Amino acid sequence: MKLGDSLGRNRKRRKRKKDGFSSLDKSQRAEDSSSSHSDGNGGRVKGGVGLAAISGRTLFGGFVVLVVGGWCAGYGLATRVFFPSPPPTGDLYEVPDVRGLGLASAEERLAGAGLELGQTDSITHPTVAAGVLLGQSPLPGQVSRPDEPVDVTMSIGPQMRPVPDVLSLDQASARVVLETGGFLVEVDSVEAEEVRGQVVGLSPSSDSMVALPAKVTLIVSTGPPLVLMPAVLGLKEAEAEILLDSLGLDVIEVEEVFRFGRDQGVVVEQEPVAASELERGSGVRLKVGRRGGQIER
């Protein structure tokens, strides 16, 4: 066989082999293409294999979370319920009740129980006297170690404050001043020469030291006492003036008017009319009858 023929045959064989590989690649690509689908964004995603992989990873992640969460919950339950913290070591003593005692007595009682007096806080109290203990920590009946002092709260008594001077103020203003200062206000009234609604008295008196909260009574004027205008018709002028003066009323004008008969020298008209309510010092006008000549008084 010639060398040229041999080379030609070898080239044909290699070409067929190359063509065979190309056909195989094409068929594999077609198979992959048929088993893929669009991911909705223009890409291609493997069909069955891709979904299976994603589902598997999700299930595995959830399983891991459940396992870890269950372990944590079980550990917490076990440490608190089945294996609680051990009680404090050392001697424990029951805390006695020291409320209502003074500091010295409380310290003595605590020492008798093997404990010490700790910090002392002070507060005001409206009814508990100064120096008396109001509270304690720990509370009575609880247990404590000797190195843990018992803290107490002591009363310094009620807060003291002077009654402010609100005399001559009106009732509303006086109430504001007193209530702002922490006082409880009550109101009583009395007839007085001062104008109606003015404060004319205090109980307790101003500048008195009282314990808060304290009650203060305002004494408020209802104004001067009222009198009824009497009927003076038919009385002689002098008699009418005496009667009106005894009631605190002033005759500010007497007018003479012409009259016949028995009306000479007597009151024939009055202003205000009888039974009118008047304050003391109010003025009264009278008309007295005359016929001529001197009026009989």
Image: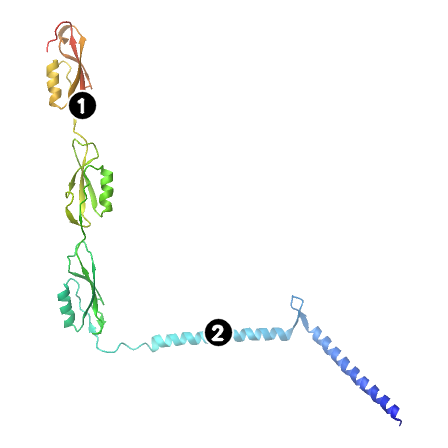
User: Quarter of the image holding residue 285?
Assistant: top left
Q: Quadrant of the C terminus?
A: top left
Q: Residue at 76% x, 82% y: name it.
A: 21
Residue sitting farthest toward the bottom: 1
Residue marked by disc 2 = 65
Give the residue drawn at x 79%, y 85%: 17
- Residue 204, by quadrant, is top left
Residue 289 appears in the rendering? yes
Question: Residue 240 in the image: x percent, y percent?
Answer: 12, 17
In the image shown, does 64 or 133 lie closer to the viewer?
133
Q: Quadrant of the N terminus?
A: bottom right
- Residue bearing mark 1: 282
Label 1 Cα crowd, 10 Å radius (few <14 / some 14-19 / many 20+): some
Q: Residue at x 44, y 75 (%)?
A: 70
Q: Secondary structure at mark 1?
A: loop
The structure residue drawn at horizontal position 10% and vertical position 19%, both measured from the top left corner, is 242
